[in-house]
Amino acid sequence: MAAIVDSILACDGASRLAGLTSMHDLVVAARPVPEDTPVEVVIVRSPSSGLVGPGAVLIEHQSTSGRDDVIARPSEEAVPLFWRFMIEKFGVAPTR
């Protein structure tokens, strides 16, 4: 989770993405966030969420159409997988 947040900050993601955290998850939406609901989000779930095992990360796209995607991968793949979801779902690519 920390590596994903560091990547967002390093890649100017904070101006293009909005997020919130829970004890176990990082929830991200594209900016500007619509005032009406529902809001399309990507959720990054850690092993402590109970939805993925140790050493893994689960990334879930919750769409407004109901066509959701869920992918679990080893934790070392979390940052590239996160950006893949940002590009595919929100059109937000990292800038260097």
Image (cartoon, helix red, strand yellow):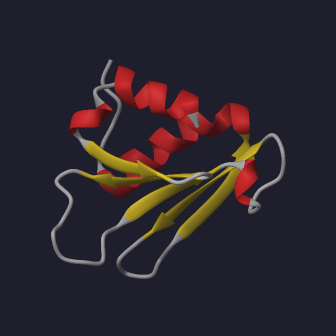
Work out which quarter of the rendered image holds the C terminus and state it. top left
Please state if 23 lies on the left or on the right of 5 as rendered.
Answer: right
Nearest the viewer among 43 and 83 is 43
Please state if 59 lies on the left or on the right of 67 as rendered.
Answer: right
Number of labels in the image equals 0
Q: Is residue 26 above or below residue 76?
A: below
Q: Is residue 59 above or below residue 93?
A: below
Residue at x 56% of width, y 42% of height:
81
Locate residue 6, reporting x and y percent: 46, 25
Q: Is residue 20 above or below residue 81?
A: below
Work out which quarter of the rendered image holds the N terminus and state it. top right
Locate residue 30, reporting x and y percent: 28, 52
Res. 50 image quadrant: bottom right
The single residue placed furthest to the front in the displayed view is 23
Residue at x 59% of width, y 51% of height:
23
Residue at x 35% of width, y 30% of height:
94
Locate residue 45, reporting x and y percent: 62, 53
Locate residue 56, reporting x and y percent: 76, 45
The single residue placed furthest to the bottom in the displayed view is 66
Residue at x 30% of width, y 77% of height:
38
Nearest the viewer among 17 and 65 is 17
Nearest the viewer among 25 and 39 is 25
Please state if 69 lies on the left or on the right of 85 as rendered.
Answer: right
Please state if 4 lies on the left or on the right of 73 as rendered.
Answer: left
Res. 35 image quadrant: bottom left
